[in-house]
Image (spheres, grey):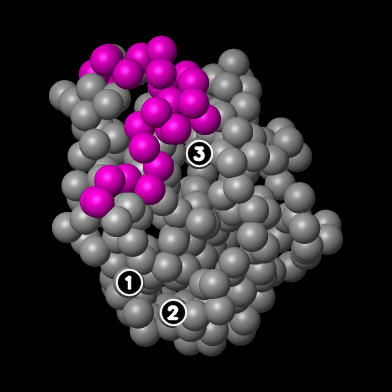
């Protein structure tokens, strides 16, 4: 699903990633671990083709080279990003947040819709896979717990129909009980066949979800554990 070879990334004069290699197979969950500033977020942003960064090397999504592509074209290949910080619309309900994600995806040219314009993940499928949200579908985003907001952020990305989901520190700031709920919901996403590249510092989350782990230190992959799955 994702193949990164010899990736180097710069922000202006700052060289952040150095010759990074990693892969994510179809339906596989792979974790990036490391301290703050190690390059985890930059790796995800490099895959997504975020503005302001310069990438060299190779990033292939489904066999298609994406170096030089803008983010909206990479999204069309089936890549969804759940950024750090949740960023839900507080005045909209859960259901309205999800419907808004479909509209934003259409304006950006995302691939994630059917031939009649509906979301590739209909609302009821999202609620089936992420039942925590079904219980609060009429609640405003601002009323949700931190864990529910994080799951809503994941659900918004799913509404665009990704084959690969990039998650940036999803457990950050959550109480232990909410982390357990998050892990359960991400495991359900994995069972639904969505591949995930997970940037995460919480050892328990990584242990429960990831089949393979890459350790980043100062922009370099220092260690890799596990077998491709």
User: Which residue was labeled with disc 1?
Assistant: 73
Question: Circle 1 — which element?
Answer: helix
Task: Say which residue appears at 76% left-offset and 50% top-offset.
Answer: 211
Tag shown at residue 66: 2
* Nearer the observer, 26 or 5: 26
Q: Classify 10 Å Cα crowding around label 1: few (below 14), some (14-19), many (20 and above).
A: some
Residue 130 counted in the magenta span: yes
Label 2: how many residues lie within 10 Å, few (<14), some (14-19) or many (20+)? many
Mark 1 or mark 3: whose residue is earlier in sequence: 1
Q: Nearer the viewer, residue 41 or 1?
A: 1
| x, y percent for residue 16 | 49, 72
Q: Which mark is residue 170?
A: 3
Residue 74 image position (x, y, % from top left): 38, 69
In this rendering, is residue 158 above or below 184?
below
Q: Residue at x 44, y 60 (%)?
A: 79
Q: Kindly indicate the quadrant of the structure image that contains residue 144.
A: top left
Q: Quadrant of residue 133?
A: top left
Which quadrant of the figure contains the N terminus?
A: bottom right
What secondary structure is marked by label 2? loop
Q: Secondary structure at mark 3?
A: loop
Q: Is residue 41 visible?
A: no
Question: Which one is in front in this view, the residue at disc 3 or the one at disc 2?
Answer: 2
Q: Earlier in the sequence, mark 3 or mark 2?
A: 2
- Check contact, mark 1 vs mark 2: CB within 8 A: yes
């Amino acid at each position: 699903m994702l193949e990164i070879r010899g990736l180097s990334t710069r922000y202006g004069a700052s060289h952040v990633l150095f010759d990074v290699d990693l892969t994510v197979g179809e339906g596989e969950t792979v974790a990036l671990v490391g301290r703050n500033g190690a390059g985890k977020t930059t790796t995800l942003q490099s895959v997504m083709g975020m503005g302001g960064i310069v990438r060299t090397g190779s990033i292939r999504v489904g066999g298609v080279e994406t170096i030089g592509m803008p983010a909206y074209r990479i999204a069309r290949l089936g890549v969804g990003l759940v950024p750090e910080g949740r960023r839900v619309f507080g005045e909209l309900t859960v259901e309205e947040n999800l419907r808004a994600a479909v509209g934003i995806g259409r304006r950006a040219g995302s691939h994630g819709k059917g031939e009649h314009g509906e979301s590739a993940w209909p609302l009821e499928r999202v609620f089936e896979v992420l039942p925590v949200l079904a219980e609060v579908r009429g609640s405003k985003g601002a009323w949700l717990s931190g864990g529910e907001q994080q799951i809503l952020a994941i659900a918004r990305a799913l509404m665009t129909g990704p084959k690969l989901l990039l998650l940036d520190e999803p457990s950050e700031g959550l109480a232990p009980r909410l982390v357990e709920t998050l892990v359960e919901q991400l495991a359900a996403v994995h069972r639904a066949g969505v591949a995930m590249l997970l940037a995460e510092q919480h050892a328990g989350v990584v242990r429960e979800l990831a089949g393979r782990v890459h350790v980043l230190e100062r922009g370099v992959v220092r260690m890799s554990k596990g077998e491709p799955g």
